[in-house]
Image (cartoon, rainbow, N blue to C red):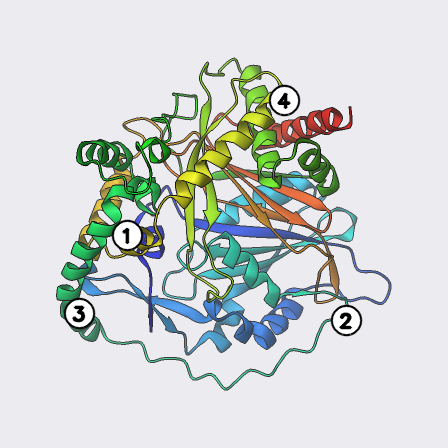
Amino acid sequence: MRQLSMTDAFMLAAENRRQTLQMASVSILAAPGAGERRVTREVLRDLVAERIHLAPALTRKLVHVPLGLDHPYWVEDADIDIDIDFHVRDLALPAPGDDRQLAEKAAQLVAQPLDHSRPLWELYVIEGLEGGRSALVFKLHHASVDGISGLDLHEMLFDSAPEGRKVPRAKRRTGEPVPSQWRMLARGLAGLPAQVIGAVEGGARSLPYLDQLMPFRLLPGVGKAVRTGRRAAGLLPGTGDGKLLEGGGLRAPQTVFDKPITPHRRWAFVRVPLDEAKTIRRRYEVTLNDVVVATMAGAIRRWMQEIEALPDEPLVAMVPISVRPEEAESGGNLVQVMLVPLPTNEESAERRLVLTHETLRSAKERHRAVPASAMQGADTLMMPALFIRATRAATVLSGLGGATANTVISNMPGPPELVYVAGARVEALYPIGGVIEGFGGFTSIVFSYCGGLDLGIITDRDAPADPWRLSELYRESHEELVALAGS
């Protein structure tokens, strides 16, 4: 058995009937050529059965500790070989099978809760797209993977050539016996003394930096309380007068997004050329992430101007950053988050890019100022039983004191070269994120794949944000920066 970290456990504890912390990708598959086979459910099922040993995170299911005395565990599912039929599914779109129909179906799929008695993933073949194309929707739970490790799991499906590749033979799998609830209760009780010691030691290392660390940074009220205590105690080793970690007292303005979310979602997608984004990057000597965030800032600004709801002050964005070392085992969440001002109040696209670069660089410096020991200590800071209850209470209360952030923006590198699934060419690879209470009504994620930046925007169904209009404005904002870079 392998225990979930505090951040992994947070992804379960923060769920409720309106909020599921799930993610997905949508791979658009080209129509088969003459003599080529279609990627049907049966073809995909056989591919997964042959390769699932390459992705251990897909063979684990949850085992909970009674009374929430400790974080849950992953146990190797002894039945996964015969249950692949449950996880791999198919459906078809009615004619004409256009992009909006695909997006509507994908949004419905990602919003439906996964079965927590089984490994937390589903894989859908969607047929009936225009032009003879099809799509794969690969749905995963945030408790088992973050964005980077979720993309890593796609290597099980992807090949660099249409003829596929030779896969090493799987070792014989026996799975693990699922421990009884009595055994898990005994394990939880036995671990209580160590939890107390871990909380004391973790607190000593982490409390001064708690507003910079996952998952506490996502809990309302933590930032203000910690900053107040830090100033009072002067606990800012290595950060001079403390301004580096303070972050300027960032506060998200009130917007039309500040309303409770529903269980339902809308999703849209768009692709822009990666080479053009790289031209912008080189011209202004910024990062690709700077370009993505600034482009989204321009899109949001234009949309909020259209509905006459643009605040005078900049919006605040949550930007995840990976802290996953190269040698880390696949799966789990190794991610921190930055809260940054989004220059939506700046009219000039060029100035928005410069401001974005400066604010993201400053946020990264604040992150680097947090010692590794503080990140490690945060995982044991709060005893699991207390943490679970505090997370659920905070989830219920989130948004009541104002939004923590107005939106979530993420950018992750996907496969740089063309890939195939069971011989079918992947034309595009679009991400689907989650909508988090208290973090605005929409999330945008970009995958870079084979010469393109593939953007997916997900919103709450009842949020005023129209994801298709935002995707159009993202393209316009991108083209504005391209024109400036070439001038």
Work out how far the residue at label 2 is from the one at label 4, CA to CA, in angstroms.
45 Å
Q: Quarter-wise, where is residue 192 in the image? A: bottom left
- Is the residue 440 above or below the residue 454 in the image? above
* Residue topped by disc 4: 349
146 left or right of 354 in image: left
Q: Earlier in the sequence, mark 2 or mark 3?
A: 2
Looking at the picture, which amino acid does disc 1 mark? Answer: Ala
Looking at the picture, which amino acid does disc 2 mark? Answer: Glu
In the rendered structure, find residue 29 and report the number of the disc placed on it: none
In the rendered structure, find residue 378 and report the number of the disc placed on it: 1
Which quadrant would the N terminus be assigned to in this image? Answer: bottom left
- Please say if the residues under marks 2 and 3 sit with CB atoms less than 8 Å apart: no
Q: Secondary structure at mark 1?
A: helix
Of marks 2 and 4, the one in the foreground = 4
* Residue placed most toward the observer, 487 or 26: 487
Q: Earlier in the sequence, mark 2 or mark 1?
A: 2
* Residue topped by disc 3: 185
